Amino acid sequence: MTPKELDYFKDLLEQTREELSADLSQLKEEAKPVSPDKGLGRLTRQEALLAQNIAKDAIEARERRLVAIAGALGRVKDGKYGICLECEEEIALQRLKASPEAVFCISCARARS
Ligand SMILES: [Zn+2]
């Protein structure tokens, strides 16, 4: 990977991290406990609870991604970004563009799933 490409992915990681953090604050609003005595606006209590559960799952998924992104930014610092943890080959740029926190190349990721 060229230094320019590395810069690009570092920016992409930081930008993704900011987007995820913004999503998280909104989702945490949605995941607030539903008051037992009333529905929320147009929503029935059951719908509100369902929305709350969806928000909780979405929060977990984003928190996991944030951890992975922090790890990827650490590897940028260590000069190991974009190297597969399994086979130590370079991870394809296309794959990193779709998922900048990826730690395995596509064939190792497939082998592990
Ligand atoms: Zn690999």
Image (tube, grey):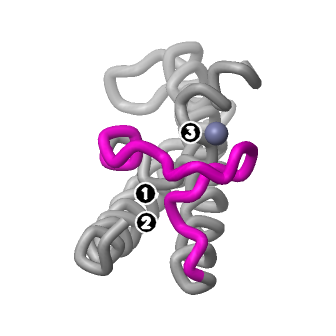
Residue closest to the eye, 49 or 20 = 20
Q: Residue 89: x percent and y percent?
A: 58, 49
- Residue 75, picture quadrant: bottom right
| Left or right of 39 on screen, residue 89 | right
SS class, disc 3? loop
- Between marks 3 and 1, how big is the CA–CA gap? 24 Å
Q: Earlier in the sequence, mark 3 or mark 1?
A: 1
Tell me the tag on residue 17: 2
Query: Residue type at mark 3?
Result: Cys
Q: CA distance from mark 2 to mark 1?
A: 5 Å
Q: Residue at x 60, y 71 (%)?
A: 80
In the rendered structure, find residue 3 and report the number of the disc placed on it.
none
Residue bearing mark 1: 20
Mark 2 vs mark 3, CA separation in Å: 21 Å
Q: Which range of residues does the magenta coloring cover?
A: 79-97
Quarter of the picture containing the N terminus is bottom left
- Counting from the top left corner in percent of width and height, residue 81 is at 53, 67
Q: Nearer the viewer, residue 58 or 7?
A: 7
Residue labelled 3 has its Cβ within 8 Å of some atom of ligand 1: yes
Q: Nearer the viewer, residue 13 or 60?
A: 13
Q: Amino acid at mark 1?
A: Leu
Residue name at image x 58 percent, y 14 percent: 46
Q: Residue placed at 50% from the left, 59% from the top? A: 82
Pointer 2: residues within 10 angstroms few (<14), some, or many (20+)?
some
> Is residue 88 a member of the stretch shown in magenta?
yes
Amino acid at the residue labelled 2: Arg
Which residue is the site of mark 3? 105
Is residue 1 shown to the viewer in this render? yes
> Is the C-beta separation of discs 2 and 1 under 8 Å?
yes
